Amino acid sequence: MPNRETTLAASILTRGVVLTQRSPSGVLTPPRALHVIAPAPFGGAESVVAGLTAGWRERGGAEVAALMASEASSRFVERVRALGTPIWEVRGGRRGYAREVREVRRLVRSQSVNVVHTHVYRANAVGYFATRGLGVPLVATVHGYTGGDWKNRAYERFDRRLLRRFHAVACVSPSLVDRMLAAGLNAARVRLIANVPGAEDQMDRAAARAALGLSADDRVVGWIGRLSAEKAPEWYLAALEKLEGSVVGVAIGDGPLRGALNDIATRLGGRARLPGAIENADRLIPAFDVLVLSSRTEGTPMVLLEAMRAGVPVVSFAVGGIPDVLDGAGWLVTPGDVAALARAVSEVLDRPAEALRRADLARRRINERFGRAQWLDAYAELYRIAGDTHS
């Protein structure tokens, strides 16, 4: 529990005097933030929360509390706790918004929180209503929208309207910035903060292949993500079916399309493997000769950044923030064009020198533009903006 001096400092910070400051080493240090998220076991939003909580602690022990709204994933809770971050689980159920709001409100007060940072629309709503009248700046990261049925699209429209009332908003891709501005958000409160690769070490190629049961000679076309409509894994399998020669497709993940995809994989025989969800799957990317992103919609996917860091060539549909990151350092094709996706994968496999050139360019780009120190500074600056706006 915070002592009297910590509580007093937090109360001063909350009034908008300052939400970030520079340490003697010159780096920006964060306030005491409460992250609110309804997590899946793995994903981009989850990686951002894990990265921020770990990063803040690395910067001199700044305290960050992560809260899981609704039915939290036990795997993700364990992951965050392993980083040394205090975490509270709020289980409100499918229609438990009121309980979640009460619990978040209680935590803001009891833990001397001076900024609330929310992720994805359910958490955005809970965070907004929980902080009303408490005098605490409210920040959100927009990770992307999946569309889907009318109900989900209605939730997303409500989310964009609600975000107008937040004190600062981060977007993970330029296209999301444009979408927020078109929805009426104040441009002074919106910042582009692209995702960065995780801090975890990746396996070497031999170890990653052994973990997946692959041989050294296999030509491996990889895919990682949630088996759901917005990620379009069926398009990946359709492209795999069009490839000539001996290839092995490995699609890591789980989700509502698993049954239908198993039927397709059965038809493809040994050419397609669906091993299910694997914790820290990004560490296995070096096993692939090429990574495919077949999504209908995206923000800036972590798996893209991890593949670039690993020096694995990437073939992707040109959606969301992917073209801004990958341009010239991979293969981009027209969204939904499965035949073009297959042709690009064939080019990677048949032109190893060109694949290596682009992969090297991608790795250099990650090292130059997507550093973790700059990323943490950008979020600390976002909190400063929130404090100024709130005051």
Image: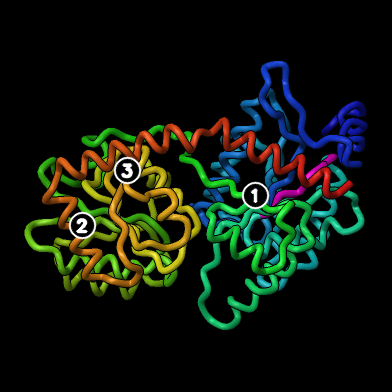
As rendered, which of 42 and 289 lies closer to the eye?
Answer: 289
Depth-wise, is mark 2 or mark 3 nearer the camera? 2
Query: Helix, strand or loop at disc 2?
Result: helix
Residues under labels 2 and 1: Cα distance?
34 Å
Where residue 175 appears, as percent x and y from the top left, is 53, 60
Q: Is residue 82 above or below residue 157?
A: above
Q: Residue furthest bottom?
A: 150
Where residue 215 appears, as percent x and y from the top left, is 14, 44
Q: Callout 3, which amino acid?
A: Leu
Residue position marked by numbered label 2 in the rendering: 345
Q: Quadrant of residue 60?
A: top right
Q: Is residue 177 above or below residue 199?
A: below
Q: Residue at x 65, y 49 (%)?
A: 191
Q: Residue at x 80, y 67 (%)?
A: 98
Mark 1, Cα crowd under 10 Å, few <14 / some 14-19 / many 20+, is: many
Left or right, 368 with reference to 52: left
Q: First in sequence: mark 3 or mark 1?
A: 1
Magenta stretch: give its range: 112-118
Q: Which mark is residue 376?
A: none
Q: Callout 1, which amino acid?
A: Arg
Residue position marked by numbered label 1 in the rendering: 191
Residue position marked by numbered label 3 in the rendering: 284
Q: Residue furthest left?
A: 245
Q: Callout 2, which amino acid?
A: Val
Where residue 47 appears, as percent x and y from the top left, is 53, 46
